[in-house]
Image: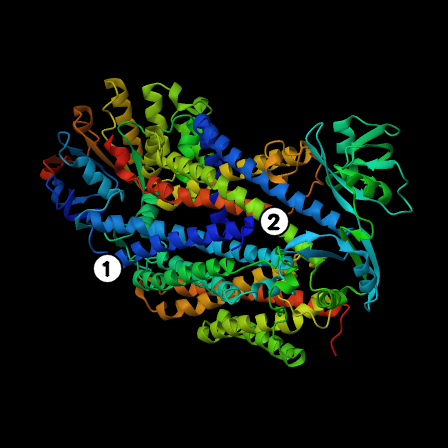
Amino acid sequence: MILQPAALALQLIALLVSAMGLYAGYYGIRILGRWDPASGSEGQLELERRTYLVSTIMSYILSFELMSLFLFIYTADDLHSLFTGAMCAAGTLAVNSFGYPALLFKIVNFLLAGVWLIVNHADNRGYDYPLIRVKYRLLSLIVPLLLLESGLLFAYFDGLKPDIITSCCGSLFSHESRSISGDLASLPHLPMQIIFFSGMAITLASGLYFYSRGRLAYLFSAAATITFLIAVAAILSFISLYFYELPTHHCPFCLLQKEYGYIGYLLYATLFGGAVAGIGVGALMPFGKVGSLARIIPVIQRRLTIIALVNYLLFTLIVVWTMVFSALKLS
Amino acid sequence: MKRAVERHLNILEFTLASLLRRKAKNLSLLAMYLLVIFILASLLFFVTGLKREAAVILNDAPDMVVQRLVAGRQDLVPDGYAAEIAAIRGVTAVRPRLWGYYYDALNGANYTVMAGDDTTAISEKATIGAGVAKVRNLAVGDLLPLISYDKAPLLLEISAIFPSASNLVAADMIVISPVDFQQLFNFPSGQATDLAVTVRNAKELPTVAAKIAARFPDSRPILKSEIQRTYQSVFDWRGGMTLIILASSLLSFIIFAWDKATGLSAEERKEIGILKSIGWETSDVLLLKFWEGLVISLTAFLLGVILAYGHVFFLSAPLFAQALKGWSVIYPDFKLMPVVDAYQLAVLFFLTVVPYTTATIIPCWRAATIDPDAAMRY
Amino acid sequence: MIELSGITKSFNSGKSNQFTAVDNVTLVVNPQQITVFKGPSGSGKTSLLTMIGCMARPTSGRIFLRGVAAAVPFQQDGVEVVEITSLPERFLNDIRRSTFGFIFQQFNLVKGITVLENVMLPAYPTGEGRADFRARALDLLEQFNIARLSGQRVELLSGGELQRVAIARALINNPSIVIADEPTAHLDTKLSQEFMAIVGRLKGEGKSVLIASHDPIVFDSALVDSLVEMRDGAVINSRSCR
C-alpha cells in the first residue's frame, strides 16, 4: 500500500470512473430493455433524456481516462526511486504483476470510449436513433472493462511496498535481493523500421484511397489499427533510442519527461488520436446502409479518415525528424 | 467546424454574463472551492518542497553508514571495525563519526552534538546552528555553557554560526572537538557512534555492504540510496496521510457542490425553461453548464494555487508546518525553494476539479432536461 | 401547411391522476394565414400549440409539417413533408429553431440582461456568427421602434415595450411560423390592438401565425383567417373566417 498523493488521486479517479461507468451501464441496460421510439409515452421520453446523460458521462470518462493515463505513467516514474533497481516508470510498473495490465486496460478503455463516442456521434445524426442498440451493447461491454481496470489499479498500488530501511537492517538484506527488470523486450530495430514505415505508408495510401473513392474502408481501418500496434512496438524498438540518443534505452515512458521536451505527450496524443479515428472508421462501416445514416456515415468516416491521417502523419514526421537530427546513428 | 466554434463562443459569453448575474451564489461556491484547493495545494507544495530539501541535504551524506546492533539496538562501533572495513577492496575511506543528542533543561530543546574533524574543530570552541543561537541568544565570541554527564560545566566559545542556508539540517547543531565530545558525554575512547564509508565506485556499494555484513554479523550497513528512498517514502506517507485526513473536507466540499448544483433556484429553473422554450436544446444547456463549471473551477484553481504558493514559499506554511515537519523545540526557520511543476498541478487538478466536475454531472443534466414547454405552463 | 392526425396528449399515464390534455385532434392549419385557437383555459390549446411547435411530443398521433424540409439537413432530397412526432429531441429542436418563433403569455424574457441580448438569445446555439445575428436583432428593434432600449435591462421596461421585445425575439431566427400563447392576457385594449396590428404585418410578410387566446380582441379581429374552437382537449368547431 502506498500513500502518495498522486497514487491517491489515481485511485480516486478509478473510483469515480467506475461509479460513472456503472451508473451509465445501468441506464444503458434499461434503455436496451424498454426502448420504443414509436411511443411518445412519458417512460420513453424519460429514456431519451437519459441518453444525454449517458453520452455526457462517456465523454467525461474518455477525458478522465486520457488524463489519468498520463498521470499514471508520470506517477510510476516519480515512484521509481522507492524501488531498488527501478530506473524509471518501466521499472515501477514491473514491481508487481498488476502494473502493466492496469496500463494496458487504461489504453484499451480509452480507445473503446473513443469509439463509443464516435458511434454515439453518428447515432445522434440519425433521426430515428438508428444505432441505439449497438451503442448500448457496446457500453455494456465497456463497463466491465472499466471495473477491471480500476481493480487492477487498486491491486497495483496495494501491492507496492517500497524498499525502505527496516529496524533490523538495511533494506538490501532484509529480503531476497530482487531485481526489477526495467528493460522491456524489444524487437530488432532495422526490420522494425521497415515494418513501421511500410505500415504508415499502407495506412496513408488506403486512407487516401478511401477518402477519394469511398471504398476499402475496412482495409484502411485495419491498417490504422495494426499500424497503431506496430508504432507502439516501434517506439520500444528504435524510436525511443533516437530520442534518448542511447543505443540501449528502450523505455517508452521517459519520452514524457522534461529532459526530452515532453515530446512523448505529442507522440502519444497523435498516436492515440489517430488510432481512435482509424478504428472509428471501421466501427461505423456496418451501419453505412442504415436508412437514416446512409448519407451521414460516409461524411463522418471521411472526416475521421482525415483526422487519423493527419495524426499519423504528424507522428511519422516527428519520428523522421528525430531520426535525421539525432546524434545517434543506428547502423 | 466554424459553426461549432461560434456556438461555443456564444454560449460561453452567455455563461460569463450569467455567472456575474448570480454573484452571491457563485461567490460562496467559489470561496469554498478556493479554500479546498488552497489547502490541498499548500499541502502538496509543502511536501514536495520538503522532499526536495531532504534530497539536497542527503546529497552531502556519506555513501554508506555502518552501524552496530546489539540486541537489536544501535550500539557504539569499536575503532577496530573501521580498520578492517578500510581494508576491504574498493573502500577508499572509513571515518568514525561521533554524534549524539544533548538535552538542554533550560528550554527543553534537544541539540544534535557532533564531533568535527580533528583538523577543523578546536578544543573549547563550538560552531552552532542558527536555531541554537536563537534559543540561547548567542553571538560569535559568546560562551555556551553545557553541563557534562558528571554535572560539571563545560564552557565553549562560539567560533562560528552556520549560515541560515543550511538551516534545515544545521539549526539544532553544535559541532565541537572530539575531545570535548568525549568529555561532555563521557564517551568511551576508541569507539564511534557509527562509521561513514566511502567507496570508489558507486556500483560496488552493495557488494561492499554485503562483505561488511558478512564480516561483522552485528553490523548494519545503510546506503545513501536507501536513506533517500526512506525519506521520500516517509514524506509521501505524511503527505498521503494528511490528504486522507483532509479527505473529509474534500468530501464535504463535494457534497456542498452537489447541493449547490442540485438546488437550482426558482429563478434559474425558470431561466433554463425560457432558454429551452426559445430553442435551446438539452445539449446546449449542458454546454452552458459545462462552461459554467469550467469557469468556476479554473478561477478557483488558479487563485487557490497562487495563494498556496505564497503561503508555502513566502510565509513558510504557518498553517501546518508543525504537523508535517515534525521537528522539536528548535524549529528550523527556513524558506523552501519555490518549486511547482506540472505534475503537482495535475495531481491537484485530479483531487479537486475532477471530483467537483463528476459531482455536478447529474445535477446539470437534470437542469438541462427541463421540459421546453415548462415555460408555457407558468 | 401543418397537418395533425389523431393527436392525443396525456399526462401521468397509467397513474390515478392521469388526465388527457388533448384528445384525438385532427386538423389542418393553412400556411401564411392567421389561425386562432379559441377556448377557455384548460381546453388544451396551449398543449396543442406546444406539440405543433415541436416543444413536446404527443402521446399518440401524427403531425406533418410541409415546406420545412429545407431546415432539416438530414432528410433525403425531395421530401417535403416531415413527420415530427417520432423525431428525437435534437431534431425537433432544429426544426423548432429554424421554423417557429414563440411569443409567451408572460413574455418570458430573461432578467438581468439587456433587451438586445434577450432578442439575440435564441440565436446563440445555432452557431451563427455573433455579428450576423446582432445586426439582425438591431434591425428588428428598429422595426419595432425600441432601438433606443437595446442597452436597457428588461426589468425596467413597460408592458408594451416588453411585448415588442418578445415579438422581436420570436423573429430573430427568421421563422416561417409564429406561435403566440395568450399574447394579450396581460395587455390593455390599446396594446392588444397594437399587437394585432403587428400580427397583421407578419402575415403580410408571408408568415403563418398561430394564436391561442380567449380574448375577443384577438378572435374577433378582422385579420383572423380561421378559428379553431376547443373545449376539454377536443376541437368542437373549426371554420374559416373568409
Tag 1: Cα neighbours inside 10 Å, few (<14), some, or many (≥20)?
few
* Residue B91 falls in image quadrant: bottom right
Q: Position of residue B140 (x, y in %)?
A: 87, 30
Residue at x 50% of width, y 53% of height: A10
Q: In the shown orientation, is residue B275 left or right of residue B294?
A: left
- State the residue in front, B324 or A154: B324
| Corner quadrant of residue B82 | bottom right
Element under disc 2: helix
Residue B208 location in percent, x, y?
75, 66
Write down the chain letter for disc 2.
Answer: B
Q: Which residue is outermost to the left?
A: C236
- Tell me the quarter of the picture where residue C137 sits: top left
The residue labelled by disc 2 is: B234
Residue B294 in the image: x percent, y percent?
49, 41
Residue A188 or C27: which is nearer the viewer? A188
Residue closer to the observer: C167 or A151:
A151
Q: Which residue is mark 1?
A: A33
Residue A96 drawn above or below residue C232? below
Q: Amino acid at mark 1?
A: Gly
Question: Under tag 1, what secondary structure?
Answer: helix
> What chain is tagged by disc 1?
A
Q: Is residue A34 above or below residue B351?
A: below
For badge 2, the amino acid type reads: Val
Q: How many marks?
A: 2
Horizontal side of A314 relative to B83 (left or right) equals left
Which residue is outermost to the front? B150
Residue at horizontal 19 percent and vertical 53 percent from the top: A39
Relative to B76, residue B157 above or below: above
Q: Residue at x 19, y 38 (%)?
A: C47
**Dot 2: few (<14), some (14–19), or many (≥20) neighbours within 10 Å?**
some
